[in-house]
DNA sequence: CAATCGTATACAAACGTTTGTATATTCGCG
DNA sequence: CGCGAATATACAAACGTTTGTATACGATTG
């Protein structure tokens, strides 16, 4: 492996000059910079990253920490982040918390051990406090949070506009002429679901409809819970459902079909997340899409921006997108 | 940050002893090893990985290189690999080739620059030769290939048993009483599809059926190609289709439905890949599942095994699994 | 022309770990 | 009790880079 000393020797200069030349320092003459980079290229020089990291105190690596990489949302976010970070000369190291508090701490320690320049993370659902993050992150490491964020923590936060998404979904159902719209709302311990509920409520009141707690269901957003919720909702006179999740929306469609309702004529459904099955099923399901790739991109960009001292990014809200399909398309 | 020198000073020994104690070398007394690890824990010591990597010439990081992390197969494989590697004290660095030859080379260079201990990769579809891999990988770096592999390259290779999967899928259709089974076979430039075709053929001949090239379709395995192929197949007297992809199988189901055939009574379909939509659609689709998580695990294990000098892993074939659902379940 | 300043490069130390070699200590054995 | 062997630890160098400080050289100016 060729080192900067090899280049220096070949050129009759010192390693320090080579280092500065390669780093683009103004302390080397343009002509020597050129000579150095040519020689480096011709000798096939590649920087020894560990050596660089040791000396500088941090690496050109960004740690990405997510609950599980095998989930479409996170893998797409990582993909987006990786693409941007690569462009800026950073590599990414991936850790999974498996939704587990202990693993999250271990991952943070690993990243600190590797002297990552930054951490881009979405915390485990079992992480209800954020002290462990403060404690296990390098003090000059940039922290970027996305999707699941702690507002108490400093640094950029990239989130879905859950309020707007739910608002648009509900608004769309009302526009399509549905008169009584139930809501499968999910677990209120999670900010995202609270925001979606609020978006739903705001859309109703904006359109002059009443909020009825009898047709809001706070169960987990899995298929069979959606099925049960929809049965009750229909019993209580609903002709549509906005669901904070796609799987529970799927359950709702099953329930409506079983009760002999036609979709979308008699019963309308809008889900959330735009899971891949929504476009393939019959009838295809309207859903409010997240843009995980974009969120990952923004997170990476926020990291890059934060590199400049003094730059503050704060919260970035990424719009969600209503995708209208058959399940809510009356006319 | 506390270093081994700090620990040494606190204990009145030298850094070298601390280093050896932490590494579990037989050159330190059991009692001092204990004292060192206790002191390290109480002082909150964490190894400086870059320093370690610099000195050792390689890091505790394994590079995983895939076409795109935002694909269910690869993200699950990575997830499996990461889980195993973490258990053994390795971190993973992720790179994407975006199915692009140039990016693949860049990624390999990045990994070498980071002195990764190993590379676990599935090459880009545009990589038709493998010289660039040999050239851009550290000479003592362990190479593990999975899914898309070059047999010319040394080291472990983890692949699906495509032959067995297609065999089982076809066999199942025959058992269900289908008499003339077409095949949407995919692109023959890819080994996986050649193996699937061979599995299909072997199942036919084993069961005393004839191979008819008129009902084997070598188009790309996308939905509309599957649709077209199925129309022709039905015209040519087929009552079932084995498809090397799920999307083309989906197209086949559409085609059969349009022609007024009932599924599975009049027409049977088995796809490949067990995409998430297969279980959700109506009728649900039988499919031959890959086990990407398991493949990732095996790849990581192969890396760990290869660490021992002299250990050879060779090719590991992971069985595929026929998942029978409504689209082929006649009785 | 000498003093001063600025530019370009050289020198050298440091980052924290690992590891080959040397030294000190202990033990067994004659 | 002394010698050699074995055990345990100390010493020191090295990995390749970055960066603060020093030096050499040339240019500018009074």
Image: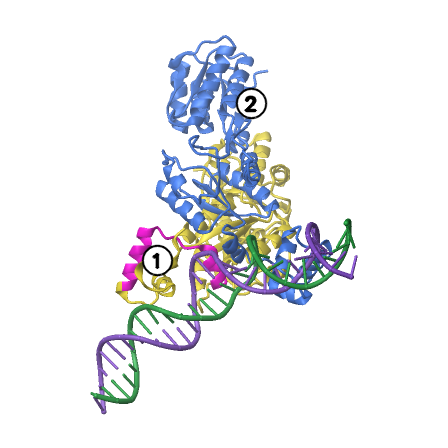
Chain colours: A yellow, B blue, C green, D purple
Compared with B44, B255 (above or below) is above
Compared with A315, B194 (above or below) is above
Question: Dot 1 lies on which element?
Answer: helix
Q: Are marks 1 and 2 in contact (CB under 8 Å)?
A: no
- Of residues B145 and A224, the one nearer the viewer is B145
Q: Is residue A48 magenta?
A: yes
Name the image quarter holding residue A40. bottom left
Q: Position of residue B214 (x, y in %)?
A: 38, 14
- Of tags 1 and 2, the one toward the viewer is 1
* Quadrant of the rendering where the C terminus of chain B is positioned: top right
Compared with A85, B145 (above or below) is above
Residue A59 seen in the figure: no
Left or right, residue B44 beside residue A169: right
- Count of all numbered marks drawn on residues in the image: 2
Residue that mark 1 sits on: A7
Name the image quarter holding residue B187. top left
Q: Residue furthest top?
A: B208
- The segment highlighted magenta reads A32-58
* Quadrant of the rendering where the N terminus of chain B is positioned: bottom right
Question: Dot 2 lies on which element?
Answer: helix
- Image point 48% across, 13% down: which residue? B204
- Of residues B169 and B126, the one nearer the viewer is B126
User: Which of the chains bears the disc numbered 2?
Assistant: B
Residue A245 seen in the figure: yes
User: Do badges 1 and 2 share one subunit?
Assistant: no
Residue that mark 2 sits on: B326
């Amino acid at each position: 492996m060729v080192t900067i000393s090899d280049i220096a020797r070949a050129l009759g200069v010192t390693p320090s000059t080579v280092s500065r030349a390669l780093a683009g320092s103004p302390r080397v003459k343009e002509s020597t910079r050129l000579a150095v980079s040519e020689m480096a290229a011709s000798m096939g020089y590649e920087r020894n990253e560990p050596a660089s990291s040791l000396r500088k105190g941090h690496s050109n690596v960004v740690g990405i920490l997510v609950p599980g990489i095998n989930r479409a949302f996170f893998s797409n976010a990582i993909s987006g982040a990786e693409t941007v970070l690569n462009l800026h000369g950073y590599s990414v190291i991936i850790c999974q918390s498996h939704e587990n508090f202990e693993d999250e701490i271990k991952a943070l320690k690993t990243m600190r051990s590797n002297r990552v320049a930054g951490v881009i993370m979405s915390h485990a659902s079992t992480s209800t406090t954020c002290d462990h993050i403060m404690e296990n992150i390098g003090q000059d490491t940039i922290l970027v949070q996305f999707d699941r964020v702690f507002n108490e923590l400093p640094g950029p936060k990239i989130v879905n506009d859950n309020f707007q998404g739910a608002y648009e979904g509900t608004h769309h159902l009302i526009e399509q002429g549905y008169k009584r719209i139930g809501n499968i709302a999910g677990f209120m311990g999670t900010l995202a679901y609270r925001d979606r509920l609020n978006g739903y409520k705001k859309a109703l009141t904006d359109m002059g409809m009443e909020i009825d707690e009898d047709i809001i269901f706070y169960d987990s957003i899995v298929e069979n819970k959606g099925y049960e919720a929809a049965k009750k909702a229909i019993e209580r006179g609903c002709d549509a459902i906005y669901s904070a999740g796609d799987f529970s929306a799927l359950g709702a469609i099953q329930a409506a079909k079983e009760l002999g309702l036609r979709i979308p004529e008699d019963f309308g459904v809008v889900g959330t997340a735009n899971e891949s099955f929504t476009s393939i099923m019959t009838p295809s399901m309207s859903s409010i899409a997240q843009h995980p790739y974009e969120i990952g991109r923004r997170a990476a960009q926020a990291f890059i921006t934060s590199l400049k001292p003094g730059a503050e990014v704060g919260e970035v809200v990424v719009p969600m997108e209503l995708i209208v399909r058959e399940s809510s398309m009356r006319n």
